[in-house]
Amino acid sequence: MNPDITSSQTAQDGSASDAASFPVFHAPETPRAQLAMDALLLRETSGIPTWIVHVMEHAMIERLAGAGPGDYLRDPERVYLRMQENCGVCLLDQYLWDNPLTMTSHGYEEAERGATTGARSVERDGILIDSPEAVVEHLDRVVFPRLERWAAEFDEDARAREIVLREQRLQNRIGPEMLKVPYGCIMFPGFAYGVYGYEHYFSAYALYPDVMEKHFRLQADVAVRNNRAAARAFTDGKLPPVCRLDHDMADSRGMLVRIETLDRLWLPHFVRSLEPLLKTDVRLLWHCDGNLMDLVPRLLEAGISGFQGFQYEDGMDYRRICRMKAKDDRELIIFAGVSVTRTLPMGTPADVREEMRFLVENGPRTGLFLGASSSIAPGVPWENLKAFVEGLRHYRLHGRG
């Protein structure tokens, strides 16, 4: 965990008068930012707020921003923010202005191969990960001691300050038209396939469940300390009360592991890690990748209060999810999106408009945001993007109140 900013920088950010006082986040009160805040608080709104529009193709970013060819490469942050403003975005959680720099108009061409993207070999701390036993060896020798030290040495006060100051710094950079809400400040146990690769990690998961349970338990020990700090950042630091949790646990066929094993090995530690936040008013959202339907009821029981993503073509039942309630019996917060894998790249403008109508008509009465289901990759026709942005504007100005 690397702080972006230290307490000595508090005064220059304007978040507190001196380093000794706890920083407080100042949310903008412009109409679009207030629309986002009202929706987060489940108030009935006149208009449906727009969530981040993350276009990856440089030419399309420039066109939506009203910029010239090559302007994004020359001044990426300014052009990216202008695109968000022109699309009427009300809320940003991830701040991804430099993310499109990682690809060309044809997508990823020279990406470095990693554990899950075709690396010929994976080595961690001098251990070649060539078997499930190598995964276990690395966990035992390196990861478990590291997690134990981290939990023992965790500085909750410093972490709480860091979270607030980082969010205020980003809000200042974004400006007052859009509300910045926290992202990435909450921890919970997760799969380690990104470290070891799918084959050897999931083989170890199947063969050595006690080791996997210990890994989830030690991750949760750290997460509890981090999330106590995050809870203070939300309450004392007055952060907007929402945060999206992002971890892919399914593909188009369903869960990456049998759901019964998650019930036994992962879910108790996931629930424990969230307990500090469930004592606050923070609404936790879950990013949906693949077909996550088997996990949805368990996430709601654990305290998740909403969802973002929805790969409808993989079996995510949008209507059914939007009729569900959070554990406290309140409406879910839903970040609904036009499909970036089907409708935007392969449909027509009429298909885009029809999907937006479907999302609004079947979404919750309060707490609904509109955007795209994920990043909009290169290759989406301009006519579809134009219909998409026009639809966002229509529902933002004339959505059901």
Image (cartoon, rainbow, N blue to C red):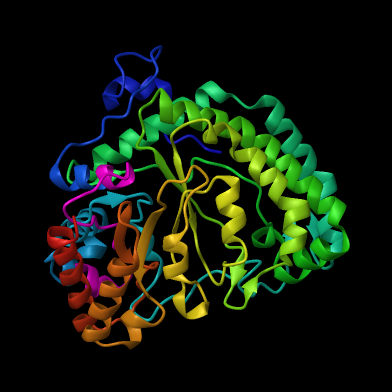
Q: In this view, does 81 lie above or below 359?
A: above
Q: In this view, does 349 lie to the left or right of 246?
A: left
Look at 36% across and 75% down and name the residue there.
104
Q: In this view, does 322 lie above or below 4?
A: below
Q: Is residue 271 left or right of residue 144?
A: left
Residue 174, horizontal then vertical, whole percent: 24, 45
Q: Is residue 1 above or below residue 178?
A: above
Q: Give the range drawn in magenta.
A: 37-63
Quarter holding residue 180: top left
Residue 352, horizontal then vertical, whole percent: 26, 79
Look at 59% across and 58% down and name the residue there.
297
Look at 53% across and 46% down and name the residue there.
327
The secondary structure that dominates the magenta segment is loop
Quarter holding residue 61: bottom left
In which quadrant of the rendered image does the C terminus lie?
A: bottom left
Q: In this view, does 376 lie to the left or right of 256?
A: left
Instruction: From the viewer's side, name the closer residue of 216 and 2.
Output: 216
Instruction: From the viewer's side, name the closer residue of 168 and 88.
Output: 88
Instruction: From the viewer's side, name the closer residue of 35 and 28.
Output: 35
In which quadrant of the rendered image does the N terminus lie?
A: top right
Residue 101, horizontal then vertical, whole percent: 36, 64
Q: Quick check: can you spot residue 294?
A: yes
Residue 335 among those drawn in magenta: no
Residue 307, horizontal then vertical, whole percent: 45, 57
Q: What is the count of numbered marks? A: 0
Q: Quick check: can you spot residue 55?
A: no
Q: Is residue 253 above or below residue 24?
A: below
